[in-house]
Image (cartoon, helix red, strand yellow):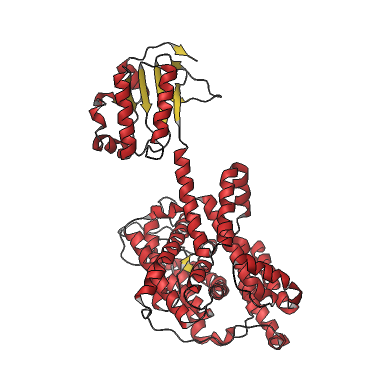
């Protein structure tokens, strides 16, 4: 059973809040979790760095910075922060437009991007902007991940097949690889797909088995024993074991400005993934996750990564799950894993020189296949064909367009979908549940009662400029059909009323007053909606004594004895 943190520590903890309440008795569990996390993270961070066009040690520095930054400023006790394959293709594509991959300028731009992302995340956490994480709906997120997976596969297949990596748009690269399949290197394919198969098998047996590390070690020993470097198998080569000194990237003001839009996209994706991770692996099931504090932790990780010449970092759901599954109790597990990685950089860098690049490609192929949520795609297809099209459109945009433009379009599609859902709201009629005082939305399969000269209506969405015209048109149509003596607006679902909607509501109430229809409001529960009534002067046309706590109370006070109809 997971040991809960002590409650005698103040809620606002300046540093190491994720360690509050930690006891020495949790050390063995954190040691075991930290060792497992390091075994999983080492090959993954190397592969992710390769995906972005960086050296392996850069990926290690990103992991160390992410782990330390989150442990210092984050709240979640399990979350693992470091280099992540979700955001790496996005910023790598954006940076490639500004500098050649692998060049010193490329590294400086990546570090500057990490600093910008870190600042944005810290501001989002400080100003409690956790709602930004909702910019991506589930279908758009699923499509986004599917598109990212295609990018990873296309970028890594040439290395696994032993072919030169083609340039150009994604579709052109796919066509170029298809034409070169006959020249594939069988040994390289054996290594790459062997690593993929090994990781997949280990994952199916138990997620705790470090399949990637086992496969990477086996592939490296195979390359050394068989002397495969002489037969065209590419290896990582020499890895420096020097720790960089903290510094601010030396780039011009115009380059900082060019990085801002890309930094915003990356920050949004990090917020979405951090929010999902911290809610899925909550520190305390009895208390809501502190998403804003975790934004601070992820932001601190990116800031440290930028200062040490790495790239933006992100929360990792799989690595976080490993910490939970292996019994980790706190961020001590992540810090131990970071220490192990640091020791590898300082004293074991030479061991990495003979790691075949095809093996890292196999690791990334596994990552890509894992982030395609086939089950969720099938579920969405069965439940909503329209939202399934959102998945297809988002994935297609990320594959066909430059990746950062595709992500921006995905965010836009998500927002447009939310707006469209709001505009679809229509006026509904309420009926009384027989032999009760409950009024419920009319439904063909639910028997209800209506009063002949009374109409009870509702609008199940925030009332705004997006749907105010629909609200008025539906109401006018109802009045033409029924001509009630009393009209009650059941407002429990109207959580917000903006200026345009308030003017429409004011006109509707005035119209009812002119035609001798008594207008009343019931269950105006939202505090924002109540404030809107005050702020926009709706009580100038609607007497305050016509706002009631229930529909039944409105009928009692205003006379609801009309004939009952089924």
Quarter of the image for residue 534 reads top left
Left-right relation of 120 to 136:
left
Q: Is residue 140 above or below residue 96?
A: above
Question: Do we see residue 202 in this rendering?
Answer: yes
Q: Position of residue 225 (x, y in %)?
A: 71, 86
Q: Position of residue 246 (x, y in %)?
A: 37, 81
The residue shown at (37%, 27%) is 489
Q: Is residue 528 above or below residue 24?
A: above
Q: Position of residue 298 (x, y in %)?
A: 41, 65
Quarter of the image for residue 562 reads top left
Q: Between residue 389 and residue 534, name the one nearer to us.
A: 389
Q: Between residue 477 and residue 9, name the one nearer to us.
A: 477
Left-right relation of 312 to 15:
right
The residue shown at (40%, 40%) is 466
Question: Do we see residue 207 in this rendering?
Answer: no
Q: Between residue 141 and residue 305, name the one nearer to us.
A: 141
């Amino acid at each position: 059973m997971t040991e809960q943190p002590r409650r005698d520590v103040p809620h606002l903890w300046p540093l190491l809040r994720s360690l509050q309440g930690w006891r020495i008795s949790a050390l063995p569990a954190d040691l075991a979790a930290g060792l497992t996390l390091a075994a999983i993270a080492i090959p993954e961070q190397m592969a992710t760095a390769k995906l972005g066009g960086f050296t392996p040690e850069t990926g290690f520095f990103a992991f160390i910075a992410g782990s330390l930054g989150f442990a210092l400023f984050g709240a979640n006790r399990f979350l693992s922060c470091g280099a992540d394959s979700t955001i790496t293709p996005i910023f790598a594509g954006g940076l490639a437009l500004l500098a050649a991959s692998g060049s010193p300028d490329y590294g400086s731009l990546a570090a500057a991007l990490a600093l910008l992302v870190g600042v944005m995340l810290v501001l989002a956490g400080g100003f409690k902007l956790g709602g930004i994480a909702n910019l991506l709906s589930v279908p758009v997120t699923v499509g986004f991940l599917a598109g990212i997976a295609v990018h990873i596969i296309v970028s890594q297949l040439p290395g696994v097949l032993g072919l030169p990596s083609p340039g150009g748009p994604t579709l052109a690269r796919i066509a170029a690889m298809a034409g070169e399949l006959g020249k594939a290197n069988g040994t390289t394919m054996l290594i790459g797909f062997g690593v993929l198969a090994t990781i997949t098998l280990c994952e199916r047996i138990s997620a705790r088995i470090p399949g990637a590390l086992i496969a990477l070690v086996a592939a490296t020993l195979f390359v050394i024993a068989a002397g495969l470097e002489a037969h065209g198998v590419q290896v990582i080569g020499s890895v420096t074991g020097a720790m960089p000194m903290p510094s601010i990237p030396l780039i011009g003001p115009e380059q900082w400005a060019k990085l801002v839009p890309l930094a915003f996209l990356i920050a949004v994706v990090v917020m979405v993934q951090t929010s999902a991770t911290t809610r899925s692996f909550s520190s305390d099931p009895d208390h809501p996750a502190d998403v804003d504090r975790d934004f601070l932790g992820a932001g601190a990780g990116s800031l440290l990564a930028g200062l040490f010449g790495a790239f933006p970092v992100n929360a990792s759901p799989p690595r976080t799950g490993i910490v939970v599954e292996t019994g980790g109790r706190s961020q001590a597990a992540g810090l131990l894993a970071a220490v192990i990685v640091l020791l590898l950089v300082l004293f074991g860098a030479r061991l990495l020189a003979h790691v075949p690049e095809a093996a890292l490609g196999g690791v990334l192929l596994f990552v890509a296949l894992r982030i395609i949520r086939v089950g969720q795609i099938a579920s969405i297809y069965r439940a909503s064909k329209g939202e399934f099209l959102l998945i297809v459109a988002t994935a297609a945009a990320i594959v066909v367009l430059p990746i950062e433009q595709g992500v921006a379009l995905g965010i836009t599609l998500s927002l447009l979908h939310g707006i469209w859902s709001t505009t679809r709201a229509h006026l509904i009629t309420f009926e009384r549940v027989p032999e009760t005082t409950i009024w419920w939305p009319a439904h063909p399969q639910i028997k209800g009662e209506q009063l002949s000269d009374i109409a009870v209506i509702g609008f199940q969405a925030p009332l705004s400029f997006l749907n105010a015209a629909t609200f008025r048109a539906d109401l006018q149509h109802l009045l033409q059909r029924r001509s009630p003596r009393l009209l009650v607006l059941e407002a429990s679902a109207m959580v917000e009323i903006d200026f345009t909607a308030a003017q429409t509501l004011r006109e509707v109430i005035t119209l009812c007053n002119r035609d001798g229809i008594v207008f009343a409001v019931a269950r105006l529960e939202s505090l924002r909606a109540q404030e809107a009534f005050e702020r926009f002067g709706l009580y100038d046309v609607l007497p305050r004594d016509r706002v009631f706590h229930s529909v039944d109370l409105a009928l009692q006070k205003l006379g609801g004895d009309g004939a009952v109809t089924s």
